């Protein structure tokens, strides 16, 4: 399967091509304000609120004896439903002060315990790299490829995903933690990132926010493995849903997993540098030049493409190598549309242009997914689905 990634006419985009870079954006950096948003809701379940307050104040015996958790859970009926964001910002100290008839310092201290607990179990931060199944969308060429002056990278999905560059692999990140399971925590990165298709729909299901907490607070111990996997799926699938108005993008995306905050004792965020990874160079199998791209930029990209194959030729042991095809996007004259025409094929056996007799056959093999597979004992041709 071929996957496409529209890029602007910028030096940052050129770095992606030259150095096989892949940056995972945070939800705040995405153009859809609902990207990565969790539709998790705290409802009017008194028992769950009570267990949440009891957990937050478990080290304060006098507070538990005063039945504050019971009284606060009753109070929360007046203010629910609440989103996670609203629950974190809610002024609990006002209600606590009223119930206990205490000073603001004690109320604020108890409030901080609640908010720390909610923040600890709040949804993990999301990081995405966006791609598309459509390489000829006029809108996307306009929005994401510098009004047709940019380019579109073509990736070959292998076993459903995109591998990290073996020679430039980020295997893990480390953090020193005050409240984590250990003083120093390590979180491993996957070797392969799986392409996930976006589902487009108008309505979004709300999920019980208490389900993010411990089984004691949620009040439901999930013992069956099938039930547990379905439970996780229902929460995770929201990250792969977008409104119908984005349907034209035909988006697929890679997700950068993040560890649960409970492991680290605090919310976990990657640095920008940690979110910059390098994809396997052999899985970039083509590029489409925008219809308005300048001649000097085209020449530069052709030079880069040739250099890519030269580097791959020097380090192709135990790898799968596809030909690399350069396409030209063309604005049609008789209708409002874009055609994509193959112009040059870069291969380990040479460079072929449209006029070459081997061009048509080589292009057909490329479209059908044929590649050279290098192993210790030699090289063979294989069709990669």
Image (cartoon, rainbow, N blue to C red):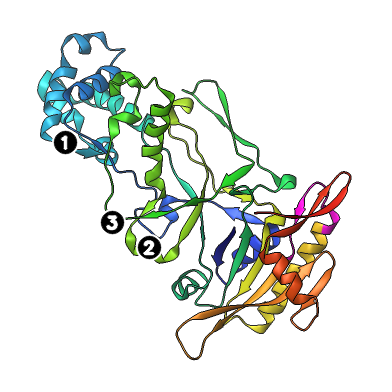
Q: Which residue is nearer to you in this view: 358 or 94?
A: 358
Q: Which residue is nearer to you in this view: 181 or 46?
A: 46
**Residue 65 position within the rendered picture, expressed as x and y whole percent measured from the top left:** 19, 8
314 falls in the magenta region:
yes
Q: Which mark is residue 202?
A: 3
Q: Which residue is mark 2?
A: 246
Neighbourhood count class around disc 3 (C-alpha, 10 Å): few under 14, some 14–19, many 20 upward: few
State the SS at label 2. Answer: helix
State the SS at label 3. Answer: loop
Whole-Å distance between the Cαs marked 1 and 3? 24 Å
Q: Is residue 177 left or right of residue 68?
A: right
283 falls in the magenta region:
no
**Residue 343 position within the rendered picture, expressed as x and y whole percent measured from the top left:** 69, 78
Image quadrant in which the N terminus is located: bottom right
Q: Which residue is mark 1?
A: 80
Which of the two labelled residues, at mark 3 and mark 2, occupies the earlier sequence position? 3
Q: Which residue is nearer to you in this view: 244 or 172?
A: 244
Which of the two labelled residues, at mark 1 and mark 3, occupies the earlier sequence position? 1
> Chief secondary structure of the magenta span?
loop
Which numbered mark, 1 or 3, is in the foreground of this view? 3
Observer able to see residue 93: yes
Q: Is residue 158 above or below residue 213?
A: below
Residues in magenta, as a range: 313-323
């Amino acid at each position: 399967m071929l996957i496409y990634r529209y890029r602007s006419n910028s030096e940052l985009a050129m770095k992606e091509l030259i150095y096989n870079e892949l940056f995972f954006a945070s939800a705040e950096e995405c153009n859809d304000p609902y990207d990565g948003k969790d539709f998790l809701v705290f409802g009017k379940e008194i028992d769950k609120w009570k267990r949440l307050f009891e957990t937050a104040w478990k080290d304060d015996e006098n507070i538990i004896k005063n039945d504050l958790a019971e009284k606060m859970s009753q109070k929360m009926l007046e203010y629910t439903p609440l989103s996670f964001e609203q629950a974190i910002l809610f002024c609990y100290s006002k209600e606590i002060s009223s119930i206990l008839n205490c000073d603001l310092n004690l109320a604020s201290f108890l409030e901080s315990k609640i908010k720390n607990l909610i923040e600890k179990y709040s949804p993990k931060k999301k990081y995405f790299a966006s791609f598309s199944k459509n390489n000829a969308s006029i809108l996307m060429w306009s929005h994401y490829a510098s009004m047709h002056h940019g380019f579109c990278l073509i990736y070959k999905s292998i076993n459903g995903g995109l591998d990290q560059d073996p020679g430039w692999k980020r295997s893990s990140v480390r953090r020193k933690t005050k409240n984590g399971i250990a003083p120093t925590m390590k979180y491993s990165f996957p070797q392969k990132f799986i392409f996930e298709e976006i589902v487009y729909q108008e309505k979004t299901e709300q999920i019980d926010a208490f389900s993010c907490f411990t089984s004691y607070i949620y009040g439901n111990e999930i013992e069956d493995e099938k039930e547990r996997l379905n439970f996780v799926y229902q929460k995770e699938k929201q990250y792969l849903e977008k409104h119908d108005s984005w349907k034209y993008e035909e988006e697929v995306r890679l997700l950068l997993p993040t560890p649960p905050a409970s492991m680290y004792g605090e919310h976990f965020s990657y640095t920008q540098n940690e979110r910059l990874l390098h994809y396997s160079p052999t899985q970039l199998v083509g590029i489409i030049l925008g219809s308005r791209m300048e001649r000097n930029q085209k020449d530069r990209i052709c030079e880069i493409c040739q250099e890519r194959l030269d580097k791959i030729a020097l380090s192709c042991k135990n790898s799968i190598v596809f030909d690399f095809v350069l396409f030209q996007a063309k604005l049609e004259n008789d209708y409002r549309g874009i055609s994509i025409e193959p112009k040059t094929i870069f291969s380990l056996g040479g460079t072929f242009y449209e006029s070459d007799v081997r061009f048509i056959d080589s292009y057909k093999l490329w479209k059908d997914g044929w590649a050279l597979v290098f192993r210790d004992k030699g090289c063979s041709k294989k069709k990669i689905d």
